[in-house]
């Protein structure tokens, strides 16, 4: 029977967290269809404990593509490998993370595999009767939810928004199979070459992958005050987010920008201070699990989307929250 | 250096209507603008032209009204523009759209660079750029935040990825999708606006592009929209006001209770 696959992403030999989330999605689909769940693990010098962990958290079969030429994402190289594997094994569904690599690899592969692809899904299900994959995603700035299927082409392909689901609990007695995928030697002299990686300033990770994002906007009034956001983020163990206003004023760099022209994120907690909530900003946070707003304006747009709001002066409120977190840590 | 920039006209996010039958967007009637992320693609191409000479060609696929975004591109300083318009293109998903755009690029002639915005703000898929590269067998560099060096054979660029800025070298021709950070877009000039008014836009139909009819429009699209829903905002906002020190303490207390109830302080030991 045609398998369901996920793509497991690696960074520097470690399997990325989002890969375990994909397995939780895939497990549900594979169980409904009563087929095996495979995962294609692509990287270099892949950590063997991580490979086992993928099995413990849902994979029945692991297609392991481990080669120095795969140490960083290069679309053409990853695509060639995946296309060859697809033509051999004929999976019925492939899901990948809606990350910078997933959102590049999947459309490139879908064209050559002549099949449909749905971007950045927040829900996946199997349609009763037809067994087609139902792919639901927010569109038009989160103003609508569209359900999409690929009735006549296989595999059915989708990217899934990071943090839109929880990984399964590890089961250490799950049986699994590992299949090594032969990697063709790098032939083309003229191909894309990765030269290096430079970390993001003031960030330990990306805001798309963060559990908690603490964001600031125009209400911070000036650059020096943005440190209040940075300090609170540190106290929460969170990443720093920002409105377009704050980025355009140069208070914080673009990778922190949340919204239509920045990142769309789904953290467990989004705390927005001094952000009024332009429609473009709200589009980036509609799938956040919990939204807290701190704003002096009772009429601010963001309150329409918030779960909890403190109406007051952020210059009083933020330090008080930080102080309280500090006390908790010491207690 | 010849760059082809792919742009899209999008509805303003506040003003969108859907066709209940086909699940596709109704484009007529709503205010339409140049996709806000496409100006960075145009600016990137214009800067490369400023630096190394050459031409900037702009292509858009869309209804008759999409001519407007091509005129805006000319006003910014782009040289040639093509409008892809045919009823047969209606209802295309990203697969079918990328096919038509790739056919148009082939007809113009494969340039040194194809440049697109990161994604369009309506469909929000970010799929068309990499898909066009696939049709044309071009290397694709997505999420490009800066172009450091470029000559007739290679370019060195930085991609903004989750872990930071990835520095890559690619042979040309190549396709880039660029992020907002790459450049501050220029404003249209008076001279450009005059040129835009005077320019007759070339429109290509399906037959001009030698396309396979089976690959076009809704019929040629592997995906189908089966349901459209407007999500109801079900969030209930608990609001507390801070007016003095006492109410500040109460508000923060309530916030912590709220966060604890949702297990959002789990990692932070009490």
Image (cartoon, coloured by chain):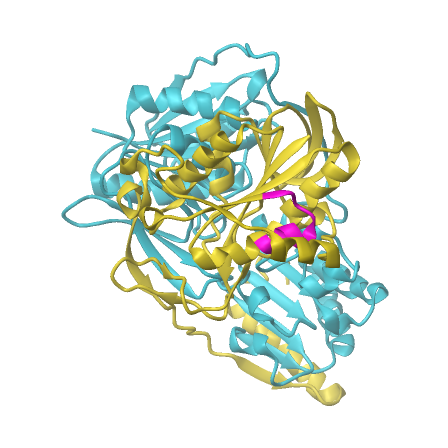
- In this image, A144 relative to B68: left or right? left
Give yes or no for residue B78 being in the magenta stretch: yes
Q: Quadrant of the C terminus of chain A?
A: bottom right
Direction right: furthest residue:
A224
> Where is the N terminus of chain A found, in terms of image quarters?
top left
Colour of chain A in the image: cyan
Name the spot of residue B202 as percent of width and height, x first. Answer: 50, 45
Q: Indicate the chain coloured yellow by its letter.
A: B
Above or below, A117 relative to A222: above
Image x and y of residue B3, in percent: 63, 35
In this orientation, which residue lies closer to the viewer: B22 or A224?
A: B22
Instruction: Please give left or right for residue B249 compared with residue B90 in the image.
Output: right
Identify the main secondary structure in magenta. helix
Residue A325 image position (x, y, % from top left): 70, 65
Q: Can I make out residue B255 in this image?
A: yes
Residue displayed at 48% across by 11% down: A184
């Amino acid at each position: 029977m045609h398998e369901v696959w996920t793509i497991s992403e690696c960074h520097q030999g470690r399997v990325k967290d989002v890969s375990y989330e994909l397995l939780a999605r895939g497990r549900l689909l594979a169980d409904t269809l009563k087929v095996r769940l495979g995962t294609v693990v692509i990287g270099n010098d892949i950590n063997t404990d991580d490979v086992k962990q993928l099995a413990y958290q849902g994979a029945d079969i692991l297609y392991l593509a481990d080669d120095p030429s795969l140490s960083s994402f290069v679309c053409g190289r990853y695509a060639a490998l995946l296309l060859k594997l697809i033509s051999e094994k004929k999976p019925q569904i492939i899901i990948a993370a809606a990350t910078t690599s997933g959102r590049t690899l999947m459309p490139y592969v879908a064209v050559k595999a002549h099949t449909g692809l749905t971007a950045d899904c927040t829900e996946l299900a199997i349609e009763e009767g037809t067994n087609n994959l139902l792919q639901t995603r927010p569109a038009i700035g989160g103003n609508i939810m569209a359900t999409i299927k690929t009735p006549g082409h296989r595999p059915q392909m989708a990217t899934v928004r990071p943090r839109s689901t929880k990984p399964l609990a590890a089961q250490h007695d799950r049986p699994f199979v590992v299949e090594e995928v032969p990697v063709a030697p790098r032939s083309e002299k003229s191909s894309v070459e990765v030269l290096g990686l430079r970390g993001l300033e003031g960030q330990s990770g990306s805001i798309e992958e963060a559990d908690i994002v603490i964001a600031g906007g125009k209400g911070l009034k000036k650059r020096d005050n943005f440190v209040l956001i940075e300090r609170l983020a540190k106290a929460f163990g969170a990443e720093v987010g920002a409105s377009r206003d704050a980025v355009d004023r140069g208070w914080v760099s673009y990778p922190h920008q949340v919204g239509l022209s920045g990142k769309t994120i789904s953290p467990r907690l989004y705390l927005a201070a001094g952000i009024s909530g332009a429609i473009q900003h709200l589009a980036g946070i509609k799938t956040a699990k919990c939204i807290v707003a701190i704003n002096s304006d009772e009429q601010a747009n963001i309150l329409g989307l918030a779960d909890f709001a403190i109406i007051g002066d952020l210059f009083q409120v933020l330090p008080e929250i930080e102080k309280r977190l500090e006390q908790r840590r010491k207690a | 250096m010849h760059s082809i920039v792919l742009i899209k006209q999008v509805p303003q996010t506040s003003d969108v209507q859907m066709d209940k039958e086909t699940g596709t967007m109704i484009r007529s009637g709503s205010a339409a603008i140049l996709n806000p992320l496409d100006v960075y693609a145009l600016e990137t191409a214009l800067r490369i032209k400023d630096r190394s000479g050459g031409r900037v060609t702009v292509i858009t696929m869309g209804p008759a009204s999409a001519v407007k975004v091509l005129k805006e591109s000319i006003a910014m300083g782009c040289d040639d523009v093509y409008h892809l318009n045919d009823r047969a293109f209606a209802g295309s998903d990203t697969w079918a759209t990328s096919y038509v755009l790739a056919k148009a690029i082939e007809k113009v002639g494969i340039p040194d660079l194809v440049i697109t915005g990161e994604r369009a703000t309506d469909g929000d898929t970010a799929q068309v750029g990499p898909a066009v590269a696939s049709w044309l067998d071009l290397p694709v560099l997505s999420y490009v935040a800066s172009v450091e060096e470029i000559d007739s054979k290679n370019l060195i660029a930085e991609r903004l990825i989750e872990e930071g800025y990835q520095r890559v070298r690619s042979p040309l021709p190549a396709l880039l999708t660029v992020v907002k950070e790459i450049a501050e877009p220029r404003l249209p000039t008076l001279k450009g606006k005059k040129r835009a008014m005077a320019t007759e836009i070339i429109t290509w139909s399906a037959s001009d592009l030698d396309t396979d009819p089976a690959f076009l429009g809704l019929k040629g699209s592997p995906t189908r929209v089966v349901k459209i829903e407007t999500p109801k905002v079900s969030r209930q906002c608990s609001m507390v006001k801070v007016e003095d020190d006492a109410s500040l303490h109460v508000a923060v207390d309530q916030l912590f209770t709220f966060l604890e109830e949702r297990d959002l302080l789990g990692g932070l030991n009490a």
